[in-house]
Amino acid sequence: MLRRALEFVDADKLIPSSNCGMAPLARGAALQKLGALPAGADIVRAELASVAVPAAR
């Protein structure tokens, strides 16, 4: 989704965030989704900077 958003928004204007919708999820699933958000952002930032992907948080 982040790569797709970059087709329409400059990278310096894109702010990855949840769209809520976490309430009906099991706590563990919500925490995994919240953890995936910064991990995905790190991957795309590294691609844009053409550097290695940082280690998992």
Image (cartoon, rainbow, N blue to C red):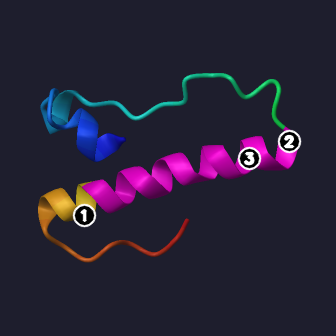
Q: How many marks?
A: 3
Q: Is residue 25 left or right of residue 33?
A: right
Q: Position of residue 55 (x, y in %)?
A: 46, 75
Secondary element under disc 2, as helix, strand or loop, is helix
N-term-proximal mark, 1 vs 3: 3
25 within the magenta span: no
In this figure, which residue is indicated by the disc labeled 2? 27
Q: Position of residue 40 (x, y in %)?
A: 43, 54
Q: Give the residue at x 69% y 52%.
A: 32
Circles 2 and 3: CB atoms closer than 8 Å: yes
Give residue 49's quadrant in the image. Answer: bottom left
Secondary element under disc 1, as helix, strand or loop, is helix
In this figure, which residue is indicated by the disc labeled 3? 31
Q: Callout 2, which amino acid?
A: Arg
**Callout in the foreground (1, 2):** 2
Which region is colored magenta? 26-44
Q: Quadrant of the N terminus?
A: top left
